[in-house]
Image: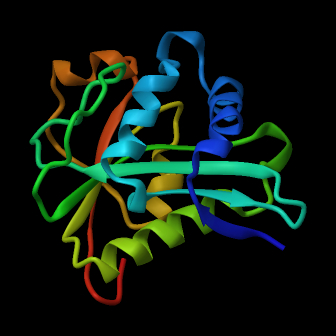
Amino acid sequence: MLRILPVTETVWPDILRIQAESYPASILEDGEVMRSKWRVSPQTCAVCVDAEGDVLGYVLSHPWAGNVPPSLHQALASPADCRTWHLHDLAIGVAARGRGVAGRLVTHLLGQARQAGIEGISLVAIQGAETFWSRHGFTEKAESTAAFDSYGTAAVWMTCALTETGP
């Protein structure tokens, strides 16, 4: 049985382990930078655990009003006052891939956003994840700028407009 829980201080070693399993060294973020997203907006961050309480994956999201995505490796100091969120990171541990963890976390986050009256969510798709995000209602945003440099050359900025019932 999979459960979605809030991020707490005790799960950070698991989050950092999963991040290291999921990304190349060039885009791994320092633990304090990752924690800054959670500290700014703990209600928009979650983990998925199994019946034993083992962390299988996580999602970190935060308010964001910018017309470009936030750069990697930069800590957030305070939340933006806005009606949109930026999904900073979704990662699943190697042993948990293919078990529906990512979909559960995305569904949870979209539900939380709708309940909060959020108008939309943005993200930067990397490592060819655009297809996954498209299945969850995200579409490519036309603007592509140097702001993506920290994400790598194949990064794609995507957005999802939210309604009470969709995407």
Instruction: Report if residue 95 is visible in the image.
Output: yes
The residue most toward the top is 26
Which quarter of the rendering shows the C terminus? Answer: bottom left
The residue most toward the right is 52
Give the percent coordinates (x, y) of residue 43: 40, 62
Left-right relation of 138 to 89: left
Residue beneath the point at 35% across and 59% down = 138
Q: Quadrant of residue 20?
A: top right
Residue beneath the point at 38% across and 22% down = 151
Q: Is residue 136 above or below residue 143?
A: below
Give the percent coordinates (x, y) of residue 49: 75, 59
From the viewer's side, name the closer residue of 13 and 56: 13
Give the percent coordinates (x, y) of residue 140: 28, 49
Which quarter of the rendering shows the N terminus? Answer: bottom right
Residue beneath the point at 75% across and 41% down = 93
Q: Is residue 118 above or below residue 63?
A: below
Q: Is residue 77 above or below residue 108?
A: above
Instruction: Report if residue 159 is visible in the image.
Output: no
From the viewer's side, name the closer residue of 139 and 122: 122
Give the percent coordinates (x, y) of residue 109: 45, 66
Left-right relation of 49 to 156: right
Residue beneath the point at 10% across and 56% down = 81
The residue most toward the bottom is 165
Left-right relation of 132 to 41: right
From the viewer's side, name the closer residue of 62 and 167: 62
From the viewer's side, name the closer residue of 9 and 18: 9
